[in-house]
Image (cartoon, rainbow, N blue to C red):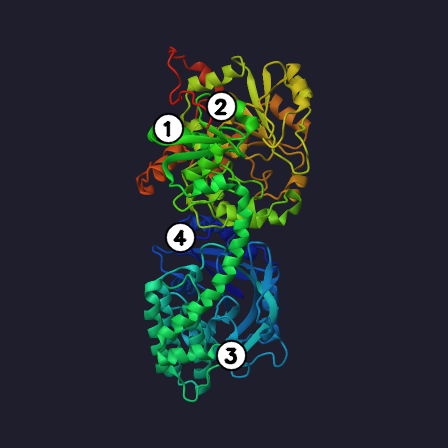
């Protein structure tokens, strides 16, 4: 029998679940089991649980066949508990370092009480940590153990179950279970604390209580389910009646009940507007029915609210709440005045455009901070032209990038009148980063965030942990995220990261990345054409070298001696070198290119065509590895500064331990791999297969179609093409196989979907 059983109910927490489980499994104290209950979670959380259970035998997973809610999920875990003590942990919260050892030590010091109460701290998106405001109630002065009658002030702690350790035999003896519905912690907490004869406290923060900015919190959900609170307090007072408890608890619990009802009434975002009067009248009925003899309302500002409930005076309560809203409105208007003055820089023209109706058939696209026409937005643009040609498509482009805009693409220059008119009136705005802060999200507009890679490096709010990697204003970042309506994901791993580091109310579309469709749909002729465009002769082995950006490196300086590498690999090998888009041109690359030793493809308009043309990818920590894996071609990781990069930028996994193929940490190792079959042998293929299984979830060649049909044409997700299983996908053929396929007779027809040239607007 382990000392502890931790019951962890799980529902729609894939972005937070690994951190929760890691906080438990990483404890120095190891005498515990985890009962994780998958409450029929629709987001893949159950898969994460199974993966953890395979790696650590202390985790047992229960998969419920239907969603039953938090309380009943806890009951399912409780039935399987074997530990001497039971602890509950919500799956988006975490244990602090050393928490279990501190709890075990305190239990031993106090003679194994029935309940041990420990402290918690709230953690916020900005990395701030605020300890429980009532932490002073947990002082360890006085007797080690006591009953609630000796320290009744403990009732003033938040009524939660996850800040306590309960003896399992005490739970069995008292018959404690969780009821269904919202606020299920109230009956359990009050009834257990009243029943326990020996309680102890631990004046230490053992749980970090995550304050999620969006979602995952019933307190931020407008619903009639808040009426469940009446049933919960019916159970509490029914418990008192059944156990003939002393009258001393009726007064304190009556006060807790009334305060709880008032909180639900007063807080915005809980009750539907049409249900507020009904809730008030039911609260008033409970007040009169359960009012203890001789009860004295609190002497503070709550006194008049108690009186309104006692009289069932809903109009008076409405007036009081309205007065409070007026005061808040005055403060809000003052802030809005300041905000409007700042918006003045947008100009009168933009403001005039914002007053005009939206153009339901206008879509605005941008990619990589308006550097050109590329990536996921470009793939969506092309599919939109095929499926919805009535939608006008306009690209936002920087003035210095205009020359790179393909013929036939309509565009506006950033900052021009055409730009302000387009972003003001477009129904759809599609970007793989964020539009400028000055762009206002209008009611009715749809913003699609496509992203531009699977995250190996830390992103979004996680970059707060690595201040050397960014000078980002995270408050502004979240305001930008609040404009999103859709976030596109290429794999479950990305989804879990995006939803956690960009917490907002958008909808995730697990469609795959549109830009990767071509990697699954291209044929032999496409591969040959991509190579011909680069001047690669048949029989040449082409390696695409794509290093990522480094915050500690001001410009693109190849970490390889490319000239020496090219010489060692011989005349039948070509190095295609592509610098990160954050870097400008490289004089060194220009020099080497003029010597004919490498091909600089940094300015090539389509990285996807470079993928098709190459025999293998050499990269360090670039997200290119995730896209390239869809081709099922060799990937070589050259990681000569992994220790530095992972510390400065932060990463989500160790690419040296979970590589997509062969790994080299020095140029000599890389040269040896490339001169032998090490870069494409069976061991490298096995690593690539594991990597593909982990990260090639949704890229099946139909991503752009799914996005256009759902976002632009309004088709339900259930009607879209299902994801093709990985084993059934057929990637574009390798250059060697493409060369063996006979070429069809070429025609003089124009490429499909090419639009006639138009003027800039």
Residue 385 shows which numbered tag? 1
Residue displayed at 45% across by 43% down: 492
Residue 57, position as x, y percentages in the image? 50, 54
Quick one: label 2, few (<14), some, or many (20+) residues within 10 Å? many
* Front one among 701 and 125: 125
Closest to the camera, between mark 2 and mark 3, is 3
Which of discs 2 and 1 lies nearer the camera? The answer is: 1
In space, the residues marked 4 and 1 are separated at their CA atoms by 37 Å
Q: Quadrant of residue 488?
A: top left
Q: Nearer the viewer, residue 140 or 433?
A: 433
Residue 129 in sight here: yes
Q: Earlier in the sequence, mark 4 or mark 3?
A: 4
Which mark is first along the chain, 1 or 4? 4
Which residue is identified by label 3? 300
| First of labels 1, 3 by sequence position | 3
Which secondary structure, mark 4?
A: loop
Callouts 4 and 1 close, C-beta under 8 Å: no
Residue 153: x percent and y percent? Answer: 54, 79
Label 2–label 3 contact, CB within 8 A: no
Res 568 seen here: no
Q: CA distance from mark 2 to mark 1?
A: 20 Å
Q: Is residue 205 above or below residue 19?
A: below
Residue to which mark 2 is pinned: 609
Q: First in sequence: mark 2 or mark 4?
A: 4
Secondary structure under the numbered disc 3 in the rendered image: loop
Query: Which numbered tag is attached to residue 41?
Result: 4
């Amino acid at each position: 029998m382990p000392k502890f059983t931790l019951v962890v109910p799980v529902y729609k927490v894939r972005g937070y679940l690994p951190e929760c489980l890691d906080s438990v499994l990483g404890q120095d104290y190891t005498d515990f089991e985890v009962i994780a209950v998958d409450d029929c979670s629709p987001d893949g959380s159950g898969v994460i649980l199974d993966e953890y259970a395979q790696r650590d035998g202390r985790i047992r997973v229960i998969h419920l066949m239907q969603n039953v809610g938090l309380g009943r999920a806890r009951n399912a875990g409780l039935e399987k508990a074997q530990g001497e003590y039971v602890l509950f942990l919500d799956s988006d919260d975490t244990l602090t370092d050393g928490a279990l050892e501190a709890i075990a030590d305190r239990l031993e010091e106090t003679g194994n009480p029935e309940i041990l109460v420990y402290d918690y701290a709230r953690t916020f998106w900005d990395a701030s940590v605020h300890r429980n405001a009532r932490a002073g109630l947990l002082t360890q002065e006085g007797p080690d153990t006591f009953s609630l009658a000796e320290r009744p002030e403990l009732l003033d702690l938040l009524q939660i179950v996850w800040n306590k350790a309960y003896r399992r035999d005490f739970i069995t003896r008292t018959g404690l279970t969780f009821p269904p519905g919202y606020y299920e912690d109230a009956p359990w907490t009050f009834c257990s604390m009243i029943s326990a004869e020996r309680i102890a406290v631990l004046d230490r923060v053992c749980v970090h209580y995550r304050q999620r900015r969006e979602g995952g919190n019933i307190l931020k959900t407008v619903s009639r389910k808040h009426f469940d609170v009446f049933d919960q307090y019916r159970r509490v007072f029914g418990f008192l009646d059944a156990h003939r408890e002393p009258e001393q608890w009726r007064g304190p619990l009556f006060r807790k009940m009334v305060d709880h009802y008032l909180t639900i009434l007063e807080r915005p975002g809980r009750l539907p507007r049409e249900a507020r009067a009904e809730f008030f009248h039911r609260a008033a009925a409970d007040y009169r029915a359960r009012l203890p003899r001789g009860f004295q309302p609190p002497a503070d500002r709550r006194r008049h609210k108690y009186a309104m409930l006692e009289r069932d005076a809903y109009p008076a309560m409405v007036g009081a709440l309205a007065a409070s809203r007026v005061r808040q409105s005055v403060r809000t208007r003052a802030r809005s005045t300041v905000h409007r003055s700042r918006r003045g820089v947008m100009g009168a023209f933009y403001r005039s455009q914002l007053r005009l109706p939206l153009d339901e058939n206008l879509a605005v696209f941008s990619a990589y901070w308006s550097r050109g026409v590329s990536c996921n937005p470009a793939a969506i643009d092309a599919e939109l032209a095929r499926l919805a040609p009535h939608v006008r498509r306009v690209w936002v482009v920087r003035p210095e990038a205009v020359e790179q805009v393909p013929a036939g693409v309509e565009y506006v220059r950033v900052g021009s009148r055409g730009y302000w008119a387009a972003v003001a009136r477009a129904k759809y705005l599609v970007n793989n980063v964020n539009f400028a802060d000055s762009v206002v999200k209008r009611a009715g507009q749809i913003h699609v965030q496509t992203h531009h890679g699977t995250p190996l490096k830390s992103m979004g709010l996680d970059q707060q942990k690595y201040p050397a990697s960014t000078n980002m204003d995270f408050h502004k970042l979240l305001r930008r995220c609040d404009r999103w309506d859709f976030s596109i994901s290429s794999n479950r791993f990305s989804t879990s990261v995006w939803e956690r580091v960009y917490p907002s109310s958008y909808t995730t579309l697990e469609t795959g990345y549109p830009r990767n469709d071509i990697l699954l749909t291209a044929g032999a002729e496409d591969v040959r054409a991509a190579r011909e465009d680069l001047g690669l002769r048949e029989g040449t082995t082409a390696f695409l070298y794509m290093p990522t950006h480094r915050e500690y490196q001001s410009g693109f300086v190849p970490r390889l001696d490319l000239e020496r590498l090219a010489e060692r690999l011989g005349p039948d090998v070509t190095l295609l070198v592509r610098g990160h888009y954050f870097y400008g041109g490289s004089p060194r690359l220009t020099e080497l290119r003029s010597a004919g030793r490498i091909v600089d493809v940094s300015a090539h308009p389509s990285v996807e065509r470079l993928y098709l043309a190459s025999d293998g990818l050499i990269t360090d920590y670039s997200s290119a590895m995730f896209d390239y894996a869809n081709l099922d071609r060799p990937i070589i990781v050259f990681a000569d500064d992994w220790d530095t990069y992972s510390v400065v930028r932060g990463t989500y996994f160790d690419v040296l331990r979970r590589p997509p193929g062969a790994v080299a940490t020095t140029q000599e190792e890389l040269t040896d791999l490339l001169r032998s079959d090490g870069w494409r042998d069976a061991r490298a293929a096995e690593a690539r297969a594991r990597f593909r299984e982990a990260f090639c979830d949704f890229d099946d060649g139909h991503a752009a179609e799914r996005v256009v049909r759902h976002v632009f044409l309004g088709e339900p997700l259930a009607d879209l093409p299902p994801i093709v299983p990985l084993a059934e996908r057929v990637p574009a053929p390798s250059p060697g196989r493409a060369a063996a396929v006979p070429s069809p007779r070429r025609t003089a027809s124009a490429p499909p979907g090419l639009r006639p040239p138009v003027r800039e607007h």
